[in-house]
Amino acid sequence: MSESPDGLGFKLLHVGVAVPSLGPTTELLSNLFGYKVVSGPFDDPIQKVTVNFLAKSDADVAEIELIAPLSEDSPIRSMLAKDGGGAYHLCFETSDIDGALAHAKKNGCIVVSSPVPAVAFEGRRIAWIYTRSRQLFELVESNAAAT
């Protein structure tokens, strides 16, 4: 396990945006900024959400993930009810998700969700951490780490 962030291979993967439904915001980002769906929609029964990933081109540093509730008990519903949604998390890919969680804990983060497989990432594991400054981050294991 690495003690430094450099050894964990962190890379910004996407910005998560909570929306009531995927269609209207997908259309808006397409018409307004030229973004197109690059993968999805994916229904994730574990996370209780449906998601689309958007980008302008392969040269984009990170994608936009639109996240809408899949069911009445979806955790994203509380965010939508509170402030109508919007950007709420950054997602970082890591070459060592278990090491990244240990590193996050050492830096005062709370592990909100231990690693679970995610439909949108072809079964690669994701985990969630929450910082002392009240920021939510998603971690996704890289393709190389998942094999």
Image (cartoon, helix red, strand yellow):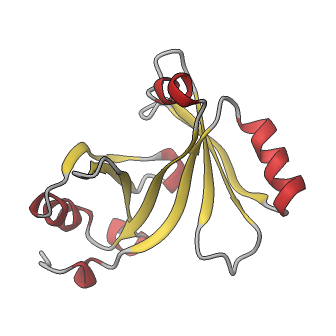
Question: Left of 82 or right of it: where is 103?
Answer: left
Number of numbered labels in the structure image: 0
State the residue at coordinates (71%, 37%).
Answer: 22
Measured as percent of width and height from the top left, residue 75 is found at 44, 27
State the residue at coordinates (57%, 26%).
Answer: 70
Measured as percent of width and height from the top left, residue 59 is found at 69, 81
Answer with the quarter of the image where residue 86 lies. top right
Q: Quadrant of the N terminus?
A: bottom left
Q: Quadrant of the C terminus?
A: bottom left
Answer with the quarter of the image where residue 47 lies. top left
Relative height, residue 79 to residue 40 (above, below): above
State the residue at coordinates (35%, 54%).
Answer: 125
Question: Left of 21 or right of it: where is 105?
Answer: left
State the residue at coordinates (54%, 22%).
Answer: 81
Measured as percent of width and height from the top left, residue 105 is found at 13, 57
Measured as percent of width and height from the top left, residue 28 is found at 83, 47
Question: Left of 3 or right of it: where is 87?
Answer: right
Viewer-proximal residue among 137 and 37:
137
* Residue lying at the far right of the rendered structure: 31
Viewer-proximal residue among 138 and 42:
138
Relative height, residue 40 to residue 78 (above, below): below
* Residue lying at the far top of the rendered structure: 72
Answer with the quarter of the image where residue 96 lies. bottom left
